[in-house]
Image: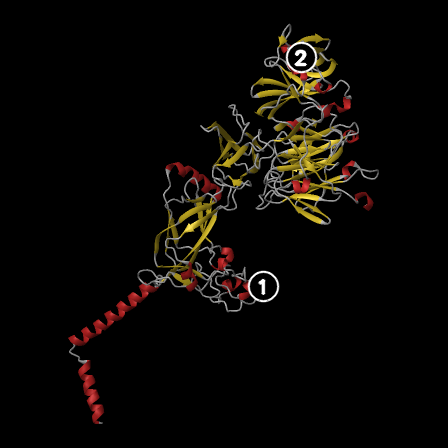
């Protein structure tokens, strides 16, 4: 059995799982080639993180279904939709993508969509891959297909016929994608674009490519390391892929003018061309958005690919915008231009006949005129396919309905263009220079954006697309296509407009939806952008969840500088020190008395020192070290400075100093604020809070005002939570007890995805004796004073003078 699993393929989605949410799960799949000893169920396994439990990729199948089951080429998990995506291939050479819901990390038997069946031309599937941190799903092999809806439908991106894509390389930052074929050719595209480019090849037998976090590509071989750059960065990728090849093909083109600045190029397919190689004579997706350039002069930007089967010779064409005029032939290159031209039908072609020119002028067709194109303004163009004799030639019309009949065209009213290959290749196709600039509204330079949207909150994102360079037409249609990865998670509203400078502005408003948590990507695609642009696709990640940067903070009534906290002295205007240094191993009093602490929380803990107030049995049973557990000295507690000043009860062992107030504390404002990446905002309705004393102390009271529109919600929450609920606006605290009070404030659930909790301490000092001590002292003092007055009164009325008797007694003592 060990030999069955010697070699396998690893499949996974490249996503960032920092600050992972509860609903986010990472998956890894391993596939093995099926052989005689491996069943279909044991040739593909997957596992959710932490990758301890491995399960078969296929759900349990019935016996009838098993006999019809296909081979699992790839199984990926779409985290945005919580679905499993299968790429299947059966014995009938049929390739299918099937999408299934996941339940408890296991795919259901029933598919989410009807399976998508690829055409038979997709005969060598290799795998599927999600572009990192996006919802763009690519299926690749001898063809490349793109899905933007989670695998429900696919569109053909590229057809490589006999060449097969064996691996893909992606940059999440720049949206670059490289498809590398078995022959070593490198094909380049941007995520979401419907075109691609050839950028060169790699001749190394053993190598790997990878993109770093800034979108720079690198190549690693056993004996060297080659550092490249972004594909659009001044051609730095040439260090890895070499010179970009000509993306043209070997056939003649027939130009047909539509306007002075727009023309159609028809690709000629000779009748003798074998059926299996016709594709090498046609335009396809690779040519969209590229530049047709004459080797002499002139160039045009391809805007649209046209496919047609009405003409056997012209199966494809492109509409192009002329940027630089193309050069025409002159009489030295083609003497036929000296004559008048007439056109007549000839079976399935047209005969071009030269009229006798001026005596003494040589005018004739030459063999070099084959595959040149006769262009007549306002009429069809004619591609010369053969020379009958010096005065006659056969040609194919690009637009048969616009062929002029019974007309002659004098010299200089018709022209000759050379886009053939009989005299050597006369034209090339290359990538177009970048034609659009992308700008975010906040001038952010980062293309890796992660935004959290809390419950009831919204987020607005604005982008600008600026045309750059020649050949960029603004035709009033949106320049940016928006694709939402998971529309069920967030509500998305889009507004687009052009400004006076023909820049396209887009404003996107995103709001949370009900109580649903999840993640979605939001793709901005400039469909007309060149693959040479650094940014053509912008994919921010939006999470309907709580931001890890969002927290609630208590604003103290008086701010004490850090240096005073370190020194332990901060006096107010009356000389009262507002910082209390707690005794070692301090525990706050309980309701049973100061000498009987019952809390488990130690403050200023030191295991090497004795524990005060530990005389009673209940006090001895309470009190547990946290940070200082299982150590013998305070130094071993390893308390950091942040922990020493933390209000959290989890770090009470480290807490040494707390704010100090004089008794009584009345109407202390409990001011709360929420801090997030968007700044700081006060806590107010609809946020409601609960307040507890972590050491279960009493003798404190909260007062607040409840608006009429909040009362019903407050009462409802109190019936569920079984604790008082307070309005955070105008909340104030009064304390009648002594020593340390430690409060925890929590935002009630249902108004935010976050668990917003804040804690703060107040040490109440200089407290008078508690009842009845003060009263007893006053009564005793009054009794003593009253008794003394009564005795003096009785002595006076009885004429008794104790002082005189004392004097007499003293005199007698001296005389003796």
Q: How is the image coloured?
A: secondary structure
Residue assigned mark 2: 360
Q: Earlier in the sequence, mark 1 or mark 2?
A: 2
With respect to residue 613, does 49 lie above or below? above
Q: 675 and 286: which one is in front? A: 286
Q: 147 and 613: which one is in front? A: 147
Q: Which quadrant of the figure has residue 298? A: top right
**Residue 622 place in picture, x, y as percent:** 52, 61
In the rendered image, the quadrant that contains the C terminus is bottom left
**Residue 27 place in picture, x, y as percent:** 66, 42
Q: 312 and 11: which one is in front? A: 312
Q: Helix, strand or loop at disc 1?
A: loop
Q: Gap in Å between the C-alphas at discs 1 and 2? A: 115 Å
Apparent side of residue 504 relative to residue 416 in the rendered image (left or right): left
Apparent side of residue 603 relative to residue 86 in the rendered image (left or right): left
Q: Which quadrant of the figure has residue 144? A: top right
With respect to residue 293, does 812 lie above or below? below
* Residue 723 seen by the camera: no
In the rendered image, the quadrant that contains the N terminus is top right
Residue assigned mark 1: 630
| Crowding near the residue tagged with mark 2, few <14, some 14–19, many ≥20 C-alpha atoms within 10 Å | few
Identity of the residue furthest to the bottom in this view: 816
Q: Helix, strand or loop at disc 2?
A: loop
């Amino acid at each position: 059995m060990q030999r069955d699993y010697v070699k396998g393929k690893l499949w996974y989605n490249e996503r960032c799982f920092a600050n992972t949410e509860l609903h986010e799960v990472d998956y890894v799949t391993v596939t093995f080639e099926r052989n005689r000893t491996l069943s279909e169920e044991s040739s593909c396994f997957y596992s959710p993180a932490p990758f301890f439990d491995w399960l078969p990729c296929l759900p349990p199948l019935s016996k009838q279904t098993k006999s019809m089951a296909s081979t699992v080429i790839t199984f990926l998990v779409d985290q945005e939709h919580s679905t499993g995506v299968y790429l299947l291939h059966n014995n009938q050479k049929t390739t299918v993508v099937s999408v299934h819901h996941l339940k408890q990390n296991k795919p259901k038997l029933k598919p989410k969509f009807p399976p998508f069946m690829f055409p038979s031309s997709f005969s060598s599937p290799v795998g599927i891959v999600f572009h990192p941190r996006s919802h763009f799903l690519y299926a690749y092999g001898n063809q490349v297909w793109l899905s933007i809806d989670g695998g429900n439908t696919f569109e053909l991106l590229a057809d490589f016929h006999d060449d097969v894509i064996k691996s893909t390389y992606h940059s999440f930052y720049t949206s670059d994608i490289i498809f590398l074929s078995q022959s070593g050719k490198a094909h380049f595209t941007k995520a979401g674009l419907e075109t691609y480019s050839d950028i060169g090849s790699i001749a190394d037998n053993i190598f790997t490519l990878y993109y770093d976090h800034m979108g720079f590509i690198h190549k690693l071989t056993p004996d060297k390391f080659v550092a490249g750059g972004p594909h659009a960065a001044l051609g730095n990728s040439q260090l890895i892929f070499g010179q970009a090849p000509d993306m043209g093909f070997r056939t003649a083109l027939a130009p047909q003018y539509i306007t002075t600045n727009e023309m159609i190029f028809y690709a000629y397919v000779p009748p003798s061309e074998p059926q299996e190689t016709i594709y090498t004579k046609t335009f396809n997706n690779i040519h969209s958005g590229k530049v047709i350039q004459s080797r002499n002069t002139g160039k045009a930007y391809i805007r649209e690919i046209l496919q047609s089967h009405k003409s056997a010779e012209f199966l494809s064409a492109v509409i192009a915008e002329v940027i630089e005029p193309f050069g025409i032939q002159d009489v030295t290159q083609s003497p036929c231009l000296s004559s008048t031209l007439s056109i007549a039908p000839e079976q399935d072609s047209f005969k071009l006949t030269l009229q006798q020119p001026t005596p003494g002028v040589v005018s004739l067709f030459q063999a070099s005129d084959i595959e040149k194109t006769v262009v007549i303004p306002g009429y069809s163009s004619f591609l010369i396919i053969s020379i009958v004799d010096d005065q006659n030639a056969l040609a194919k019309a690009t637009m048969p309905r616009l062929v002029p009949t019974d007309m002659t065209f004098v010299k200089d009213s018709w022209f000759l263009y050379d886009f053939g290959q009989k005299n050597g290749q006369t034209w090339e196709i290359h990538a177009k220079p970048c034609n659009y600039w992308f700008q975010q509204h906040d001038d952010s330079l980062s293309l890796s954006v992660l935004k959290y949207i809390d419950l009831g909150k919204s987020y607005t994102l604005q982008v600008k697309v600026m045309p750059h360079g020649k050949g960029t037409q603004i035709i009033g249609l949106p320049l940016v296509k928006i694709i939402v990865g998971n529309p069920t998670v967030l509500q998305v509203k889009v507004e687009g407009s052009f400004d006076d400078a023909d820049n396209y502005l887009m404003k996107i408003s995103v709001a949370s939806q009900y109580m649903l948590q999840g993640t979605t990507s939001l793709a901005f695609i400039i469909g007309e952008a060149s693959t040479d642009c650094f940014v053509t696709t912008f994919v921010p990640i939006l999470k309907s969840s709580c931001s890890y940067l969002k927290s609630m903070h208590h604003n103290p009534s008086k701010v004490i500088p850090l240096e005073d906290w370190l020194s332990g002295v901060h006096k107010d205007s009356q000389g009262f020190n507002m910082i209390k240094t707690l005794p070692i191993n301090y525990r706050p009093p309980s309701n049973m008395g100061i000498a009987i602490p019952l809390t488990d929380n130690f403050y200023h803990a030191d295991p090497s020192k004795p524990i005060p107030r530990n005389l009673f049995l209940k006090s001895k049973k309470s009190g547990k070290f946290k940070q200082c557990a299982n150590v013998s000295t305070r130094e071993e507690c390893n308390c950091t400075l942040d922990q020493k000043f933390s209000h959290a009860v989890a770090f009470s062992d480290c807490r040494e100093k707390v704010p100090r107030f004089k008794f009584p504390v009345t109407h202390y404002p409990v001011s709360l604020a929420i801090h997030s990446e968007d700044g700081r905002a006060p806590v107010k309705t609809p946020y409601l809070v609960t307040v507890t004393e972590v050491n279960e102390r009493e003798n404190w009271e909260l007062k607040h005002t409840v608006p009429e529109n909040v009362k019903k919600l407050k009462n409802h929450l109190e019936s569920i939570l079984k604790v008082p609920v307070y309005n955070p606006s105008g909340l104030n605290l009064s304390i009648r007890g002594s020593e340390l009070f430690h409060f925890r404030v929590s935002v009630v659930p249902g108004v935010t995805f976050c668990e917003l909790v804040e804690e703060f301490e107040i040490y109440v000092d200089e407290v008078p004796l508690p009842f009845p001590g003060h009263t007893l002292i006053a009564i005793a003092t009054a009794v003593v004073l009253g008794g003394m007055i009564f005795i003096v009164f009785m002595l006076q009325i009885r004429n008794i003078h104790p002082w005189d008797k004392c004097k007499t007694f003293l005199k007698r003592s001296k005389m003796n």
